[in-house]
Image: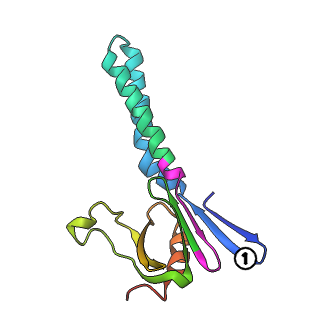
Amino acid sequence: MVNQHTTKGDAERAVYRAVPSSYIAMSLIWWISLGVVTYLSFKDPSGQDAWTMVALMAFLAVLSSAWLAAFRLEIGDSWIKYRSLFGGERTIRDSDVVSADSPRGANRFVETHLPPFRIEIVARSGTIERRTVINLKVFSRDAVSHLHKRLAPFLAK
């Protein structure tokens, strides 16, 4: 689940997914809340608000798990493919990479919505430069290390 090395013809690729500790850190709170609210709803089944809370907690628990399950990072011989639930899937060829940066936290106000532990890759697609932000927090240290090694020539010093 965390790391698979597969061979496709002569090309080798590594596939990384969200690590179990990410599920524990990001989803467990919703699953525990769901259990508590469900228990309280059965204890006093007359309250309509309690069942609304059960539905809300169930939705949040499933959404957080689906969000984490959608993360995938594939590193091939000459490309990087990244997928997230809300960002979709992007494939970046090494030859298209213009620059890469690994900032920590939010350095400016406009960055407050970005993941705190990330890599930002700027790639040229024709005449357009696109920035791809990879959320590193959900992946294993091996995945982060592999990505850093691949992008080393482009990372800002």
Q: Quadrant of the N terminus?
A: bottom right
Which span is picked out in magenta?
67-79
- Identify which residue is drawn at 56% across, 68% down: 81
Label 1 SS: strand
Q: Residue furthest right?
A: 9
* Foreground of the two, 139 or 108: 108
Write down the residue under mark 1. 11
Q: Name which quarter of the figure residue 32 lies in.
A: top left
- Quadrant location, the C terminus: bottom left
Q: Nearer the viewer, residue 141 or 62?
A: 62
Does the segment drawn in magenta span residue 69?
Answer: yes
Residue 11 location (% of width, % of height) = 72, 76
User: Quadrant location of residue 72?
Assistant: bottom right
Query: What's the image's color scheme?
Result: rainbow
Give amino acid for label 1: Ala
Most extreme residue toward the top, as rendered?
46
Identify the residue at image location x=60%, y=60%: 2
Q: Which residue is painted at 44% across and 80% down in the image?
A: 127
